[in-house]
C-alpha cells in the first residue's frame, strides 16, 4: 500500500475514529494499522501515541510484546507455520524448508523485494487438520507439498489473498462425538428467555444447583465466581469471554465459535444478566482472526433480534452488548489477569493477585472471566435446569467436557463426553491403536503413560482444559517435551525471574542433551530448575512450563538416558567450532588449530 | 590401615595455573606471607608458577586462575581436570570469565583485525598465524563451562584470608566456607 | 503481644499494621526477607521472586502478600535459600555483571544478596547478551548489562517523579528497560539526578557520572555487615 501521496492522518485517523481515539483500544488500532500498512512504522507509532495521549514507549511496548505486531517490514505476505508438536508429527518441517527454498530465504528473513517472510509460530489450533500455517493471520490447514507449491505460485504472482482458492482457507469442525451441548438444538433467545423468567437470583440458583465448574482448566465453581462478582461493590461490571485458546493441542473453542457462537453469546448475555453487567467482551486469539467478521455479523443479528442492546427481550433496563477484542499472539493472555491487561490495551503481563478480577478486573471493575465452553454451557443450564445438569457426569465434575483430540489417531477432532470417561475409552473411540502416551491438557498439562489409561477425565482425577494429544509408540517423548519447553520459552512474558530465565535455562539444557552433550549433570539440572519454576513463578505459565519435562523424566526416562554421555561433564558448546572465526582470520587449519574432544 | 580417628599425614599435592588471568590471584596466594609456610607444611606443589614444572601430574588439588580464552587454556584446563581430584576456580575470571569477557559482544575476527591492522601506530600486514600460537575462542568462558569444577572462590582477587580459609578447610576435610568479610566479587 | 495484629515468621511473632505486606512487616520488625524489586514507598512489584516464602504450604511472594493475623510464614529455611540462590544465579548469567569494574560494587543489592546467600558461582552457562550502554545524559548513564528488569525505575519515574521516562518493553528474555524519547536516549529526556528514579536501582544500571568509587573498599555499605543485618536501613532508605 503506497503512502507516498497520503499523510499519516489520512491513513490513521479513520482507524482512530472507529475506536473513538480511546487508548483502551490500542491493540485494535495497531491491528488495523498493520492490516493496512503490513507493519507499524515509526511514524505511525509517533502519530498514534500523540493521538491517544500515550507515552511513545507505551505504544512501542505493546508492539514489542505481541508476536503478531511488527515495527519493521515483514513482507506483503507474512507466513507463519504452526509449530505445535502435532504439526511436527504431520511433517511441517519438510514443508517449511520446501517453501523457504522456493523463495531462497532463511527462516524469519524478509525477501529482498519485500514480498514475503516465512517463520514459525505457536500452535494455531488446527491440530486435527494440520500441518497448518497462517498467512497474514489467516489460516491454511491441511498443508501438503502440492498446496505449498501452489501458495508459492500465488505469492510470486502477487495475487491478493481475497482471490486465493476458498478451499485453502476451509476449516473443518470434525465433530466425532456429540453429547448434550453439541446435540441439543438451539433456538436463539430461548435460554435467555428462561433466564429472564427465573430472574438473576433464580438463574444463579440454577447455576449453583448444577454444581458447574469452569471449563478453562482451573475448575473453579462458576456460580461462586458469578456471585462474588455480583456482590462486589461498584456500579459497573463486566463479563469477559476468554477465547484466547492458546494451549497447544486445544481447538474446541474454535469449533464452538465457528458453529455454536449463538450459544456462546447467549451464555454471555445470561451471565451479564445474572451479575448485572451491561457489557461483555470477547477476547479472541489472533489466530482466529478469520472468524471476526462472521462473529460480528452474528452479534449484529442478535442486536436486531433484541437479544442484545437496550431493554433486551423487552425487559426494561436489561441492557447488554458484546464487543470483540482481538489478541495479537501471546499465549500468556489466556491467564485471566494478563487477558484483562491486554483488553485494556497493554502488554499482557499477569497482575498481582489478590485482588482478583471478580472485585478488581477490567478497568478496575468487578469482572467475570469465563471460558468459551463455560458460557456456552450456561445456556443448557438455563434451558434444562441445574438439577438436570447436576445429574450428568460425576459428582464432583458435573456435565460434559469437550475434548480436542489430535496426534496419532485415525479420527482427530472434537469429542464431547460426560465427565468420568476413561482415557482408554477415548483412545478407542478416536482410533488410537498404538498409543504410548497421551498429553492431557495441552503443553501445560499432564503426560500419561499406558499404565494410566484407566484414569478418568474429571476435575478429581485428570483435569483438563480440553486438549488430548496422542503419541504412538514410535514417538520420542524427549523431543515432544523439548518442543513444549521451547513453546513456553517463546511465550514467557518476562515479568518474573524464574520463568523469564528459567524457561531459557531449561531449553538450553534440553538442547544440550539433544545435541549429544548431555550427562547425568544435566538430568540433575532439569530437576532443580523444575522445582524452582513450578513453585516460584508468578503465574500458571511458569508454574506449569516444566511439567511435561518432569512427567517424561518420570515416565519416559530412557528417552533421555539414551542420549546421555557416560561422562561427568561435557561443555554445552562445541569447542572446535568456537575456534572457527579465529581459524578463518588467521588462515590456519593445522592440527593445533583444532580442538578435539576431551577424552 | 588407618583407624577412623586418624587423618592421613601425607602432604597433599597441589597444582596451580593461570589461564586468561592477570596473575593477581596468584599474587594474592603469595600474599599469604607467613601462612604460606603453614600451608607448605600441609601441601607440596606440582605444576605451578612457583615450581616451574611444565605439566601437571596426579594431584589432590588443582587451582585455576583465569577464564578460558584460547585453545591453550583448554588444553591446560583439561590436563588439570584429568589429573586433579579436586578442581578449584580461583577468582572472578575463573568463576565467571571476568573482565576478559567484555570482548564477548564482539566478533573475534573484528577484534584481531582492529588490533593488527587498524590500531594507530600498528605497522602490520598479517594476523599472526604461527602454528605455535594458540587460537582465540569466539567467547571467553568461565572454567566451569568447559570442565566440571568442584569449588569456587570468588573475588578479584580473592583476599589472602579467603584463600587461606578455603584451603585449610579443604585440607582438613571440612566443606570449605568463607566468612562474610572474605566473600567478595571485587 | 496482641495476636490480632501478629503473624509468625519462622517461629517469631511479627506485629503488623493494616495494609502492610508480609515483607514490609517483617523488615520493620527486623526480620530480613531477601528482595530486589521492592523499595519503600513504591508499590510492590513482585517480579524478582527473591522474597518467595511459604505460607500455609504455598509458595508466594512476601512483597505482594497482605499480612494477616495468625499466618505462619517459612522464610529462612535451607530449601527457600536454595531457591533464592538459584534465582540470583539466573540473574547473574542473564546479564553481564562485572563486579570488579562496577561503580556500584560494595553498595549493590544483587551482590549483597549473593554474599549473604553464599552464592559462590553463577553456576549456569552465561548468556553473554549484547546489552547497551547509554551515556547520552550529562549527569547519569545507563548500563543495561547490569539491569535485572525489576521495574523500580519505571515505577519511581511514573508514580513519584511524574515523568514517565522509563518503561519495560519486549517479551520474555527480550524484556528490557526503554526510554520514552523519540531517540530512545536518556539524554533527550528530562531525567535529573534529583529524581526518585535516579536512586532506586538495586544494581548499577542507573548511576551518576563522575562519581565512581567514592567510598574506599572496606567502608562500603555491604563490605562488613550483611544485608540481612541491615533491615533498618532497608526500611528507612530514601532515594
Image (cartoon, coloured by chain):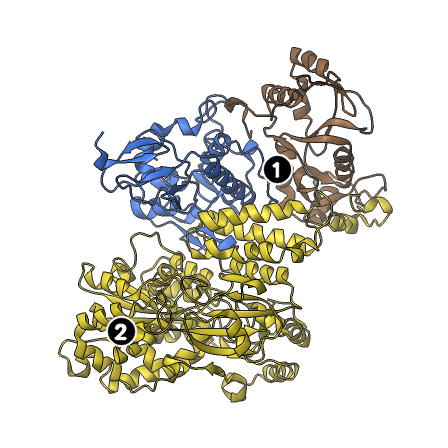
Q: Position of residue B12 (x, y in %)?
A: 74, 21
Q: Secondary structure at mark 1?
A: helix
Can you tell which mark lies on residue A386?
2
Structural crowding at the residue carrying mark 1, measured as other residues with C-alpha within 10 Å and reported as few (<14), some (14–19) or many (≥20): many
* Residue placed under numbered mark 1 in the picture: B96
User: Is residue A317 among what the camera can see?
Assistant: yes
User: Is residue A278 among what the camera can see?
Assistant: no
- Give the residue drawn at x 60%, y 59%: A482
Residue A540 or residue A42, whichever sits in front: A540
- Position above or below: B23 against A444: above
Chain C rendering hue: blue
Task: Determine the image quadrant of residue A325.
Answer: bottom left
Residue A432 or residue B63, whichever sits in front: A432
Q: Which chain is yellow?
A: A
Task: Determine the image quadrant of residue C61.
Answer: top left
Structural crowding at the residue carrying mark 2, measured as other residues with C-alpha within 10 Å and reported as few (<14), some (14–19) or many (≥20): many
- Give the residue drawn at x 41%, y 61%: A460
- Position above or below: A495 against A167: above
Chain letter for the residue marked with disc 1 in the picture:
B
Chain letter for the residue marked with disc 2 in the picture:
A
Q: Position of residue A226 (x, y in %)?
A: 25, 65
Q: Quadrant of the C terminus of chain C?
A: top left
In the image, is C192 to the left or to the right of C133?
Answer: left
- Position above or below: A397 against C197: below
- Give the residue drawn at x 38%, y 72%: A393
Labels 1 and 2 positioned on one and the same chain: no
Q: Position of residue C217 (x, y in %)?
A: 50, 23
Q: Position of residue B83 (x, y in %)?
A: 78, 32
Q: Which chain is brown?
A: B
Amino acid at each position: 500500500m503506497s503512502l507516498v501521496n497520503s499523510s499519516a492522518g489520512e491513513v490513521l485517523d479513520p482507524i482512530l475514529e472507529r475506536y473513538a481515539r480511546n487508548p483502551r483500544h490500542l491493540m485494535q488500532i495497531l491491528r488495523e494499522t498493520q492490516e493496512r500498512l503490513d507493519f507499524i512504522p515509526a511514524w505511525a507509532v509517533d502519530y498514534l501515541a500523540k493521538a491517544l495521549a500515550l507515552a511513545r514507549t507505551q505504544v512501542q511496548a505493546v508492539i514489542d510484546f505481541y508476536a503478531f505486531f511488527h515495527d519493521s517490514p515483514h513482507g506483503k505476505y507474512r507466513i507463519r507455520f504452526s509449530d505445535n508438536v502435532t504439526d511436527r508429527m504431520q511433517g511441517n518441517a519438510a514443508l517449511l524448508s520446501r517453501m523457504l527454498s522456493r523463495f531462497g530465504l532463511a527462516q524469519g528473513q524478509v525477501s529482498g523485494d519485500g514480498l514475503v517472510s516465512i517463520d514459525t509460530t505457536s500452535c494455531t489450533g488446527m491440530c486435527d487438520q494440520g500441518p497448518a500455517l497462517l498467512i497474514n493471520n489467516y489460516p491454511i490447514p491441511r498443508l501438503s507439498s502440492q498446496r505449498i507449491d501452489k501458495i508459492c505460485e500465488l505469492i510470486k504472482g502477487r495475487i491478493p489473498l481475497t482471490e486465493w482458492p476458498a478451499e485453502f482457507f476451509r476449516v473443518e469442525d470434525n465433530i466425532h462425538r456429540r453429547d448434550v451441548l453439541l446435540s441439543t438444538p438451539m433456538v436463539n433467545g430461548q435460554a435467555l428467555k428462561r433466564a429472564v423468567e427465573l430472574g438473576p437470583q433464580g438463574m444463579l440458583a440454577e447455576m449453583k444447583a448444577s454444581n458447574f465448574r469452569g471449563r478453562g482448566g482451573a475448575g473453579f465453581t462458576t456460580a461462586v465466581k458469578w456471585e462474588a462478582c455480583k456482590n462486589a461493590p461498584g456500579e459497573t461490571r463486566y463479563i469477559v469471554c476468554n477465547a484466547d485458546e492458546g494451549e497447544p493441542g486445544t481447538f474446541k473453542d474454535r469449533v464452538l465459535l465457528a458453529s455454536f457462537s449463538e450459544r456462546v453469546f447467549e451464555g454471555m448475555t445470561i451471565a451479564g444478566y445474572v451479575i448485572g453487567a451491561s457489557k461483555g467482551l470477547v477476547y479472541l486469539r489472533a489466530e482466529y482472526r478469520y472468524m471476526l467478521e462472521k462473529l460480528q455479523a452474528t452479534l449484529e443479528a442478535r442486536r436486531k433480534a433484541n437479544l442484545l442492546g437496550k431493554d433486551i427481550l423487552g425487559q426494561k433496563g436489561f441492557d447488554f452488548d458484546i464487543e470483540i477484542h482481538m489478541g495479537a499472539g501471546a499465549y500468556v493472555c489466556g491467564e485471566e489477569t494478563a487477558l484483562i491487561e491486554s483488553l485494556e490495551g497493554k502488554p499482557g503481563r499477569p497482575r498481582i493477585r489478590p485482588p482478583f478480577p471478580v472485585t478488581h478486573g477490567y478497568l478496575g471493575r468487578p469482572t467475570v472471566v469465563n471460558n468459551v465452553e463455560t458460557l456456552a454451557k450456561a445456556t443448557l443450564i438455563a434451558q434444562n435446569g441445574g438439577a438436570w445438569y447436576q445429574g450428568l457426569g460425576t459428582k464432583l465434575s458435573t456435565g460434559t467436557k469437550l475434548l480436542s483430540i489430535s496426534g496419532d489417531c485415525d479420527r482427530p477432532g472434537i469429542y464431547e463426553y460426560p465427565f468420568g470417561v476413561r482415557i482408554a475409552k477415548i483412545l478407542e473411540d478416536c482410533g488410537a491403536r498404538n498409543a504410548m502416551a497421551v498429553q492431557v491438557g495441552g503443553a501445560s498439562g499432564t503426560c500419561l503413560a499406558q499404565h494410566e489409561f484407566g484414569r478418568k477425565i474429571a476435575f478429581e482425577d485428570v483435569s483438563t482444559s480440553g486438549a488430548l494429544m496422542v503419541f504412538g509408540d514410535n514417538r520420542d517423548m524427549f523431543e515432544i517435551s523439548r518442543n513444549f519447553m521451547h513453546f513456553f520459552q517463546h511465550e514467557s512474558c518476562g515479568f518474573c525471574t524464574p520463568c523469564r530465565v528459567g524457561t531459557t535455562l531449561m531449553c538450553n539444557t534440553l538442547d544440550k542433551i539433544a545435541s549429544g552433550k548431555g550427562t547425568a549433570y544435566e538430568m540433575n539440572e532439569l530437576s532443580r530448575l523444575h522445582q524452582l519454576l513450578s513453585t516460584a513463578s508468578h503465574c500458571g505459565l511458569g508454574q506449569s512450563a516444566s511439567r511435561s519435562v518432569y512427567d517424561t523424566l518420570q515416565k519416559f526416562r530412557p528417552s533421555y538416558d539414551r542420549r546421555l554421555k557416560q561422562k561427568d561433564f561435557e561443555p554445552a558448546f562445541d569447542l572446535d567450532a568456537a575456534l572457527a572465526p579465529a581459524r578463518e582470520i588467521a588462515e590456519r587449519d593445522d592440527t593445533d588449530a583444532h580442538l578435539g574432544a576431551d577424552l | 590401615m588407618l583407624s577412623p580417628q586418624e587423618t592421613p599425614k601425607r602432604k597433599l599435592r597441589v597444582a596451580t595455573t593461570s589461564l586468561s588471568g592477570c596473575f593477581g590471584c596468584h599474587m594474592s596466594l603469595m600474599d599469604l606471607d607467613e601462612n604460606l609456610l603453614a600451608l607448605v607444611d600441609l601441601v607440596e606443589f606440582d605444576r605451578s608458577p612457583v615450581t616451574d614444572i611444565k605439566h601437571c601430574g596426579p594431584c589432590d588439588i588443582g587451582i585455576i586462575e583465569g577464564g578460558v580464552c584460547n585453545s591453550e587454556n583448554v588444553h591446560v584446563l583439561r590436563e588439570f581436570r584429568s589429573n586433579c581430584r579436586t578442581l578449584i576456580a580461583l577468582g572472578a575470571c575463573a568463576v565467571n570469565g571476568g573482565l576478559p569477557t567484555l570482548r564477548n559482544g564482539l566478533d573475534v575476527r573484528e577484534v584481531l583485525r582492529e588490533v593488527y591492522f587498524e590500531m594507530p601506530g600498528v605497522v602490520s600486514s598479517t594476523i599472526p598465524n604461527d602454528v605455535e600460537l594458540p587460537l582465540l575462542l569466539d567467547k571467553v568462558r568461565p572454567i566451569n563451562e568447559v570442565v566440571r569444577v568442584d569449588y569456587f572462590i570468588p573475588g578479584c582477587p580473592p583476599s589472602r584470608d579467603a584463600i587461606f580459609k578455603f584451603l585449610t578447610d579443604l585440607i582438613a576435610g571440612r566443606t570449605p566456607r568463607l566468612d562474610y568479610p572474605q566473600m567478595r566479587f571485587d | 503481644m496482641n495476636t490480632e495484629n501478629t503473624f509468625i515468621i519462622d517461629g517469631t511473632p511479627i506485629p503488623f499494621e493494616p495494609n502492610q505486606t508480609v515483607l514490609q512487616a517483617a523488615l520493620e520488625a527486623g526480620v530480613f526477607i531477601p528482595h530486589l524489586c521492592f523499595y519503600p514507598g513504591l508499590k510492590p512489584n513482585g517480579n524478582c521472586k527473591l522474597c518467595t516464602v511459604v505460607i500455609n504450604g504455598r509458595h508466594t511472594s512476601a512483597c505482594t502478600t497482605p499480612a494477616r493475623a495468625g499466618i505462619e510464614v517459612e522464610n529462612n529455611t535451607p530449601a527457600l535459600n536454595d531457591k533464592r540462590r538459584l534465582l540470583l544465579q539466573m540473574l547473574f548469567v542473564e546479564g553481564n555483571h562485572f563486579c570488579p569494574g562496577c561503580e556500584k560494587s560494595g553498595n549493590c543489592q544483587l551482590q549483597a544478596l549473593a554474599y549473604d546467600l553464599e552464592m559462590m558461582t553463577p553456576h549456569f552457562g552465561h548468556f553473554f547478551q549484547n546489552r547497551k550502554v547509554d551515556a547520552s545524559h550529562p549527569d547519569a548513564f545507563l548500563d543495561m548489562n547490569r539491569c535485572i528488569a525489576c521495574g523500580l525505575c519505571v515505577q519511581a519515574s511514573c508514580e513519584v517523579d511524574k515523568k514517565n521516562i522509563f518503561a519495560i518493553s519486549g517479551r520474555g528474555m527480550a524484556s528490557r528497560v526503554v526510554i520514552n524519547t523519540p531517540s530512545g536516549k536518556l539524554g533527550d529526556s528530562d531525567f535529573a539526578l534529583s529524581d526518585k528514579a535516579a536512586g532506586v536501582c538495586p544494581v548499577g544500571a542507573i548511576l551518576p557520572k563522575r562519581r565512581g568509587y567514592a567510598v574506599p573498599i572496606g567502608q562500603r555499605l555491604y563490605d562488613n555487615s550483611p544485608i540481612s543485618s541491615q533491615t533498618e536501613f532497608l526500611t528507612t532508605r530514601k532515594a
